[in-house]
Amino acid sequence: MKIKFTNQLLLLPLTLLFAANVSGQLTGVYNGAWQFLGGDAGHTRASPHLNQITAENFADLEVAWHWRGDNFGTGVEFTFRSTPIHVDGILYTVVGQRRQVVAIDATSGETLWTFREPETMRYLRSPRTDFGKGVAYGDVNGRGVIYVTSPAFFLWALDAKTGRPLEDWGSETNIDSFSDSGVVYLIPHLVSDWPRWLEREGPYDPDHGIPRQLGMVTASAPPIVVNDTVVVLVGHEPSYDQTRIENVPGDIMGFDKRTGERLWKFHVIPRPGEFGHETWENDAWQYSGDMSTWAPAAADPDLGLVYLVTNASTVQSYTGHRPGHNLFGGSVLALDVETGERRWHFQIHHSDQWNYDIPTAPILMDLTVNGENIPALIQNTKQGLVFAFNRATGEPIWPIEERPVMQTQVPGNYTAATQPYPTRPEPLDPIVINGITEEFLLDYTPELKARAQEVLSEFEVGGLYVPALPYPHNNTYRNVVGCVGGLNIYHPPVADPTSGIMYASHRRGCSAPPFMEPTNGVDEERGLPGLSAEAWRGRERHTPTTGITVAAWAPGRNREFLPLIERLPVYKPLFQGLAAYDMNTGEKLWDIPIGETPENIRNHPLLQGVDTSATGGTGHSIQMVMGDLLIQTTEDLRGDAELNANGNPFLNARDLRTGEVLAQAEIPIPGQYGMMAYQHNERQYIVIQTGSVKRGQPGGLVSLRLP
């Protein structure tokens, strides 16, 4: 069955669609800049115009400077998630739990200025302090401005040359330690029309933020500047930390970049009379919250559109309290940056209960499909599915089918009857379609295959959308197992806008998804009060049950249940692969393992003499496009980085068409999350984000250039 497509068409002259960029790349990386988090506004993480560093001289790269982050608070020595931007010879980024803004000289690595928001109780209670991914840049009457959203949920506008908050910008915060200007107090804007806020009792303390019994809000990804609008993204506590079904909705807001005045707000959980409201059954919109935009955004300034991705509402693995498809959760959203109106959307998955929140920004580039020029949006997922749309209209480039999926066995729970599957391109890992079938069994030896079949005989095998069960359940339900094969925030995809090729790393994971352990809705460790205890015990009007209480599956820590065979999985492991797609045709060009097979697999007594090289290694593959090269390395935050004969990590220069390694350069510390490239004073630089526990090196930034 083909999907029934609903959207609002953006009616624009065809001449506007391609006016800005005949090369297929949006603004942001010309003249040596790296102006957006993902390089250009389309988040390709590519700078194809930089050609000073080539395959012939790549091995000559040397360290230009090493900027250390361990002086900016605990934890920075091994977590550095922020990709810097580069404008006019200065790099800008954030560092540490405080998300301190730093300006760094592009040539020497010298710290030019820093800015740190004064401490508040809101900051101390923020659930995502170390998830800061960067800053945004804008030009106001020829003056550079750095915009950043803090963990305490304030929007700051800083002079790019001095780091000082802008004068006559923003609003009063009523917090004594804050400056009088240069900041927008975001919470009042967020909750101004939220019924639960308007009905609250007692005074509001701006230092504390939203009262805990109402919810918790923060930011993870930076804002994005599109034309004259600063679009603010919203974050909440991760799904695995949530303790209640109530929270504040993460509405998306746009502010005037010149004054800080709020221009618009988009309700991510539709109110009565708004498009999508009917997808929240049993009045769940009244108390449901979260719906974050914690992954970065992309934009097309010429179309005047910003593209955002969302996660699900509060409490995943059980959705009986919020039946329905739950728009705009798990969706790609295209909003008009002047008005905040929805131009189009597509829901990647309905009623998420698998923590399948979309982890990466959309990739925007122009393609030629069957002879037609198309301004495209490409969306990667945790599942391993790749979706492609016309970014002006939202029409899928290739058909997307709604396919029946496994239904929940738990009374009172809700499962969508179907989920969307792209017919093209093929998934990053084909195991996600039908799960652990014969093709993917651990069949290195006949004995292992037989043992794997015996284990799986106790399970119903599914693909991506296998509903969770409580464990142990004493044979109350059929055991089920499903698989994912995509990517996550730690290894974002990249693309070459000059050729239309996309590169995405991926890893395989199969499990019998469980409910989270019971807490009866009360977070005993943090002492959170609330309505959630009552809500999880019944809420008969929302979650009618038949003898099994919802409280038995209230949120806590996740436990996955799938037996191993002497520490080996029952499926053929794929720890890390890197795939390339020609998005003009939707064809997968190549897919190669990245890294060395882990020692516990390579030297396993049951695998002696078996070729296990196709598994790849456990370190995430990190890459970007620079000139005519795919620059790639691996990290060791969660695994082992690839090391050369000297025992040191290295960068690969790969062929964009084949993936072949053309040259290598030694680096002092493994990469992490992302990298960027820029040119200043006629010299080209590569900057690697770094962080290493195992090697005892401080996290930060390493800059490379030719001698």
Image (cartoon, grey):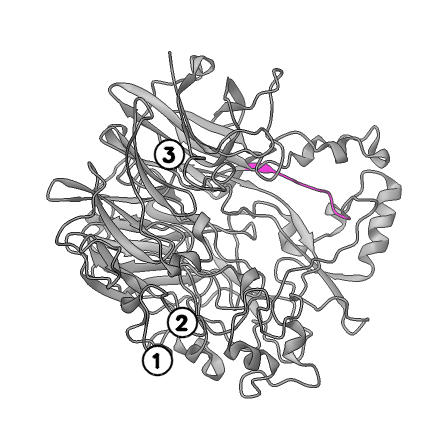
In the image shown, does 157 or 479 lie closer to the viewer?
A: 157
Q: CA distance from mark 2 to mark 3?
A: 42 Å
Q: Main secondary structure of the magenta part?
A: loop
Q: Which mark is residue 342?
A: none
Residue lying at the far left of the rendered structure? 141
Q: Which residue position is annotated with label 1?
A: 202
**Amino acid beneath label 3:** Ala
State which quadrant residue 449 falls in.
top right
Q: Secondary structure at mark 2?
A: loop
The part of the chain drawn in magenta is 570-578
Indicate whether 595 appears above or below 115: above
**Amino acid beneath label 1:** Gly
In the image shown, does 445 or 221 lie closer to the viewer?
A: 221
Q: In the visual, does 617 lie left or right of 479?
A: left
Q: CA distance from mark 3 to mark 1?
A: 51 Å
**Amino acid beneath label 2:** Pro
Residue 503 appears in the figure: yes
Residue count near mark 3 (Cα–Cα under 10 Å), binned few <14, some 14–19, many ≥20: many
Q: Secondary structure at mark 3?
A: strand
Residue 160 at what x, y percent from top left? Answer: 21, 39
Indicate whether 101 appears above or below 109: below
Q: Quadrant of the C terminus?
A: top left
Residue, x 73% and y 46% (percent of image)?
Answer: 440
Q: Are marks 1 and 2 in contact (CB under 8 Å)?
A: yes
State which quadrant residue 145 falls in.
top left
Indicate whether 385 appears above or below 241: above
Q: In the visual, does 673 lie left or right of 687?
A: right
Q: Which residue position is annotated with label 3?
A: 46
Residue 433 at what x, y percent from top left? Answer: 63, 54
Q: Which residue position is annotated with label 2?
A: 211
Which numbered disc flags the more N-terminal residue, 1 or 2? 1
Which numbered disc flags the more N-terminal residue, 3 or 1? 3
